[in-house]
Image (tube, helix red, strand yellow):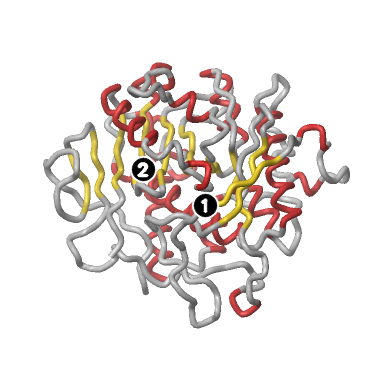
């Protein structure tokens, strides 16, 4: 059974220092981990015109999710440092700590506008998805659609995902009877924590599915386009609500962006445990579903030294046997290691004291436990 994912709501500076110290423990070897961590910015209309309430970080190798409460901590969240001097700002701006976002544009805009942070070493998973398609590449897909159509969720797993999504929407979206103000209430409601955690835990699964389908030319284009997207998003003229925002770079007739924004690449190779768990009966890669607790296979990374935001790109083996591919690019989720009746599950630590999980106490304190959403399970 996979180890439990620890979810920590970081709403004190002391907890933030602990978070930074855990992240810096793997700082030196982070160059071989692509991506080093998966990130998302949460808030009301996240952009220069909206607000930032949370910074979400999933550190895959440590199997931990940090929900860093920017609403509570304010700008100090980005400047407080660990004993070694690591801050959230230096982490997000680091060229040697690869990060993955899904649609980085408004996140980059908000971080730059409100906190003066210029993202670097980023891969945009939404761009990776577009580049991996064999069909039309003119429009972006949202994260929900990618999860539902590309992870091959079986019935029970799909119902778990939709239930979590619908509960979140009922609380936060006006068209479903909710209000954006709900996500500003503290402490965070469990339904909101559930949704945030489940969405970010799917990112490594989607990343592997898409990156395994990319050819080298498209890998380089993804990196260059990510650089360009961040540069545009952080420019004074960026419109976070543009009507053309759903149009991909592939929809532009101009083709590849100018080579002037792409700096020389350098390569490193590192060993990683496999994130695969065998083949399904249909010959596609079987994904157990989040939390995986593993990191990608041996790979080559290429890093752009551009002061913009390029970073490592995974160079997986493109000679995947045809019997392991599906025309629609899906991989099936047949089971999840935490979906049985065992006492092991996800553990949420709030203020280092109160745990949420399906059994046991957290590593940071005992305290009462509550049911917590689990990841996809077999039908």
Image quadrant where one finds the C terminus: bottom left
* Residue 239 shown left or right of residue 16 in the figure: right
* Disc 2, SS: strand
Q: Which residue is mark 1?
A: 270
Near-viewer residue (368 or 308): 308
Task: Find residue 65 and name its label.
Answer: 2
- Residue 191 shows in this picture: yes
Across and down, in percent, residue 168 comes to 39, 46
Q: Residue at x 69, y 47 (%)?
A: 222
Determine whether, in the image, residue 147 is placed left or right of residue 238.
Answer: left
Quarter of the rendering containing residue 323: bottom right
Residue 71, above or below 281? above
Residue at disc 1, secondary structure: strand
Q: Badge 1: how crowded within 10 Å, few (<14), some, or many (20+)? A: some
Q: Quadrant of the N terminus?
A: bottom left
Q: Residues within 10 Å of mark 2 (few under 14, many from 20)?
A: many
The disc at residue 188 is none
């Amino acid at each position: 059974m996979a180890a439990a994912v620890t979810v920590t709501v970081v709403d004190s500076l002391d907890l933030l220092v602990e978070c930074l110290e855990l992240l810096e423990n793997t700082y030196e070897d982070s160059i071989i981990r692509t991506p080093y961590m998966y990130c998302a910015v949460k808030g009301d209309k996240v952009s220069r015109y909206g607000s930032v309430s949370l910074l979400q970080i999933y550190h895959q190798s440590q199997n931990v999710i940090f929900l860093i409460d920017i609403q509570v901590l304010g700008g100090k969240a980005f400047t407080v440092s660990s004993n070694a001097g690591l801050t959230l700002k230096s982490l997000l701006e680091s060229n040697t700590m690869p990060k993955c976002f899904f649609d980085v544009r408004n996140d980059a805009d908000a971080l730059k506008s409100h906190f003066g942070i210029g993202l670097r070493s980023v891969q945009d998973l939404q761009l990776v998805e577009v580049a991996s398609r064999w069909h039309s590449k003119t429009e972006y897909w949202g994260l929900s659609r990618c999860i539902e159509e590309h992870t091959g969720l079986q019935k029970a797993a799909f119902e778990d995902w939709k239930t979590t999504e619908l509960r979140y929407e009922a609380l936060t979206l006006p068209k479903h009877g909710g209000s954006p103000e709900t996500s500003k209430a503290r402490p965070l409601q469990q339904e909101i924590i559930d949704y945030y955690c489940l969405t970010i835990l799917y990112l490594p699964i989607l990343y592997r599915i898409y990156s395994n389908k990319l050819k080298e030319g498209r890998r380089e284009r993804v990196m260059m386009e990510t650089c360009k997207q961040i540069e545009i998003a952080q420019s004074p003229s960026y419109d976070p609500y543009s009507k053309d925002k759903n149009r991909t770079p592939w929809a532009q007739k101009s083709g590849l962006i100018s080579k002037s924004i792409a700096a020389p690449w350098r390569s490193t190779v590192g060993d990683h445990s496999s994130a695969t768990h065998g083949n399904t009966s249909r010959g596609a890669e079987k994904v157990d579903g989040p939390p995986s607790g593993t990191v990608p296979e041996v790979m080559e990374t290429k890093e752009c030294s551009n002061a913009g935001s390029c970073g490592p790109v995974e160079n997986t083996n493109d000679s995947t046997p045809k019997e392991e591919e599906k025309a629609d690019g899906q991989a099936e989720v047949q089971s999840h290691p935490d979906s049985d009746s065992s006492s092991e599950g996800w553990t949420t630590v709030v203020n280092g004291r109160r745990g949420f999980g399906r059994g046991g106490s957290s590593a940071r304190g005992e305290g009462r436990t509550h049911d917590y959403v689990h990841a996809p399970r077999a039908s």
